[in-house]
């Protein structure tokens, strides 16, 4: 047990999928895993462990933003021995070449700060995804027929952004999309020798102001779960 996860030792798998929304974790576990059981419900943050094609998998919510994800990822890694952590979530596109519904595999993530910023001091650490996961997720995403981009994203601390100039710099520098969690996940994975990846679907477009229709959200979320599972066990 940890302050935020009530699972017993051994109830969390080495492979953990992390959607932001705990109810998405429930849906994904019930839809894609066999014998899924709820292993955490502290503060309403749900986690489930089951199997996929015989492989143990945990699907655990991260909450929104890096401070929340950091709590869960730290505890999943340090107390429960998670080794492969894949964020599945949405993002806002920052380039004309990226469209609603496209899949983005975040090779690296730029950020102003993460909860790990304090230990980096003057260093600008470059959080980066695990190559074996990127490669396998790319194949799985292409096999589904999804338009798939691999590149840099921006992990922001704010959804309601009062600094449009930061987004402009990200766009100028080819950043594909913005979300709020990946940079800290990648930093923690690096620190603890784990594999990490963020598989993202474009849910809104910062330039065209389009948004993914709500009827498409479940399907695109399901696609991300399958891409993440296939990548984890490739
Ligand atoms: N900003 C930050 N996070 C997001 C966005 C956004 O526009 N869309 C989806 N996640």
Image (tube, rainbow, N blue to C red):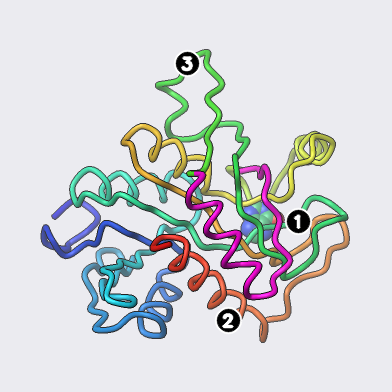
> First in sequence: mark 3 or mark 1?
1
- Label 3: which secondary element: loop
Q: Find the distance from the CA under tag 1 to the CA under tag 2.
A: 19 Å
Specify start and end residues of the magenta stretch as a single range. 131-155
Residue in the picture at 18% in, 47% down: 79
> First in sequence: mark 3 or mark 2?
3
- Label 1: which secondary element: strand
Residue in the picture at 64% in, 65% down: 201
Quickly name the residue at label 1.
Answer: 93
- Residue 47 part of the magenta-drawn span: no
Q: Find the distance from the CA under tag 3 to the CA under tag 2.
A: 41 Å
Quickly name the residue at label 2.
Answer: 218
- Measured along the vertical axis of the image, is residue 9 above or below residue 79? below
Q: Position of residue 53 (x, y in %)?
A: 33, 77
- Measured along the vertical axis of the image, is residue 174 above or below residue 159? above
- Comparing marks 3 and 2, which lies closer to the viewer? 2
Residue in the picture at 29% in, 83% down: 34
In the image: residue 42, left or right of residue 178: left
Quickly name the residue at label 3.
Answer: 121
- Residue 152 part of the magenta-drawn span: yes
Choose top left, top right, bottom left or bottom right for residue 168.
Answer: top right
- Measured along the vertical axis of the image, is residue 20 above or below residue 75? below
> First in sequence: mark 1 or mark 2?
1
Q: Are marks 3 and 1 in contact (CB under 8 Å)?
A: no
Quarter of the image where the N terminus is located: bottom left
Would you call the spot at circle 2 few (<14 residues within 10 Å), some (14-19), or many (20 or more)? few
Along the line of sight, the residue nearer the viewer: 223 or 2 = 223
Q: Position of residue 152 (x, y in %)?
A: 67, 42
Residue in the picture at 25% in, 64% down: 42
């Amino acid at each position: 047990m940890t302050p935020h996860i009530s699972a017993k030792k051994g109830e969390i798998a080495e492979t953990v999928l992390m959607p932001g929304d705990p109810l998405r974790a429930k849906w994904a576990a019930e839809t894609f895993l066999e014998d899924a059981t709820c292993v955490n419900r502290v503060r309403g943050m749900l986690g489930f462990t089951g199997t996929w094609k015989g492989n143990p998998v945990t699907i655990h919510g991260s909450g929104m933003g890096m401070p929340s994800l950091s709590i869960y990822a730290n505890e999943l890694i340090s107390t429960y021995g998670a080794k492969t952590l894949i964020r599945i979530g949405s993002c806002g596109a920052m380039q004309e070449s990226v469209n609603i519904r496209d899949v983005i595999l975040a090779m690296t993530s730029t950020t102003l700060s993460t909860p790990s910023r304090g230990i980096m001091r003057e260093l600008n650490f470059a959080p980066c995804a695990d190559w074996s996961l990127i490669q396998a997720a790319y194949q799985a995403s292409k096999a589904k027929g999804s338009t798939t981009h691999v590149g840099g994203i921006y992990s922001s601390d704010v959804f309601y952004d009062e600094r449009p100039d930061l987004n402009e710099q990200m766009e100028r520098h080819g950043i594909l999309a913005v979300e709020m969690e990946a940079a800290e996940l990648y930093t923690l994975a690096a620190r603890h020798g784990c594999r990490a990846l963020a598989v993202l679907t474009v849910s809104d477009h910062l330039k065209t102001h389009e948004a993914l229709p709500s009827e498409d959200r479940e399907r695109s979320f399901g696609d991300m779960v399958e891409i993440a599972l296939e990548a984890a066990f490739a």
